[in-house]
Image (tube, rainbow, N blue to C red):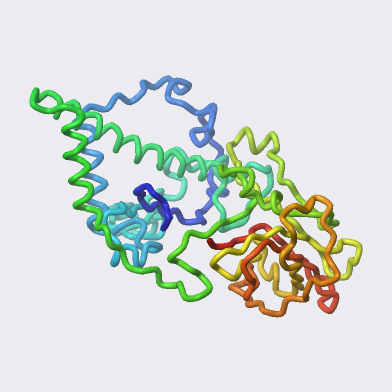
Amino acid sequence: ATWSANKAMVYYSASGAWTPSDCPPSTDSPPYCSEDWTPSVAGLREWDPSLADIMAERDLLNKFNEDHSSAARFSGSFNREYSGIGIHGFNVWEKNKHCTFVNEKTKLTESGCNGIDSVQKCALRFMTKEAAEYGSGKNGAKWHPSRAFHLLRGEAIAWLYTMILLDSVYMLETALKDSHNTLEKLSIEYEKKLSELQPVNYPSPKKCGSLYHCEQRPICHTDFKPHYGPDHMLLSSIVVGSTNWSYDPAYYSEWSMKYGYLDGKPDYTAKSGDSSQGELHLQIFINNTDFIWLCGHQKDSHKHSIVYVDLNVPLDRNMSEYVPSSTRKLWRQKKYIGFECKAVLGLPRGHHVVSVATNSSHMGHTSHLTHVIRWP
């Protein structure tokens, strides 16, 4: 995000939710929380909002946000130090004085509720037993939303942004009724107003130092999906020679394609104690920054991995047939970063092969590789 050429907004969504597993089944067919439910299926007219409707929704959102932002639990320093990035979000814990609910014990209407209070357990049409089901047909982790709650959040995001787009359409229509206005003139005017809201100089990153190199854009090789970069940015594109490390390509299943769950995490793995798995060889170019990061998506992915470096490998060599040379070195300049990465330090400028091996002195430990990060 720091290096994006485009302006952006920040959206926060809490990972957890609650599941209405104790609520009765829906009497609707299909259930209101189902992806198959639509207004037309239920015999309802599609909403056709007027300008007054859009303004009412906008004013309601602004009123709640001015009292307490729904993203306050997560946004922290963004709220204090950054302006003009439209911080917003969704979670169920933030209380708001404009939120009202009926207290279950006193049966009195009270204010200052949060999202959990406001749904009144099973009172909302959405909150039926079907909304507690997970797409896999099994119970999901308690901190992870069910399939229906993912749907609810997706629709909430779509609704929020659609309101903004409709507001923009009405604003343009109104402005263009003035014959002195043109699209080009309005574009310049709106861009100027936006620039006034978004300062040019933001605070410096809080975690930089010699290992992060915030002043330069990192180069990340990964096979994670969806992958929108060129093929040479794939992790598999820099793997050379042969390897017996296991590779999970994370194919999209029929279920994933149906529900749009396109988050795939291809992963190279090797387990200590299995000498037949050998090493994983990575072709690396070092320019001005003399280190790279080896990362895995599992905790302690590289806590016990061993690193070798074959320096200055000829560029005209057939890398698909790479075999380590007799002069390669056991690399001892390393630093553990967080729980998932290992920095390989002190690399000279040039074309090298970095090889990762498991450590037989830590039996049972599994090494994972999902990302290789380098800098210009």
What residue lies at 63% left-to-right and 53% top-to-bottom? Answer: 222
Would residue 90 be visible to someone looking at this image?
no
Q: Is residue 367 above or below residue 128?
A: below
What residue lies at 60% left-to-right and 73% top-to-bottom? Answer: 337
What residue lies at 53% left-to-right and 41% top-to-bottom? Answer: 148
Q: Is residue 235 left or right of residue 310?
A: left
> Looking at the image, which is closer to me, 130 or 320?
320
> Looking at the image, which is closer to me, 152 or 98?
152
Q: Position of residue 346 (x, y in %)?
A: 62, 75
Q: Position of residue 121 (x, y in %)?
A: 45, 50
Q: Is residue 236 above or below residue 294?
A: above
Q: Is residue 103 left or right of residue 226?
A: left
Q: Position of residue 171 (x, y in %)?
A: 19, 32
Q: Quadrant of residue 2?
A: bottom left
Q: Is residue 352 above or below residue 64?
A: below
In the current view of this chain or complex, which residue is farthest to the right? 276
Would residue 145 be visible to someone looking at this image?
yes
Q: Is residue 341 above or below residue 37?
A: below
Instruction: Tell me the quadrant of the picture where the N terminus can be found.
Output: bottom left
Q: Quadrant of residue 220?
A: bottom right
Q: Quadrant of residue 44?
A: top left
What residue lies at 19% left-to-right and 26% top-to-bottom? Answer: 173
Numbered marks: total: 0
Q: Position of residue 310 (x, y in %)?
A: 76, 67
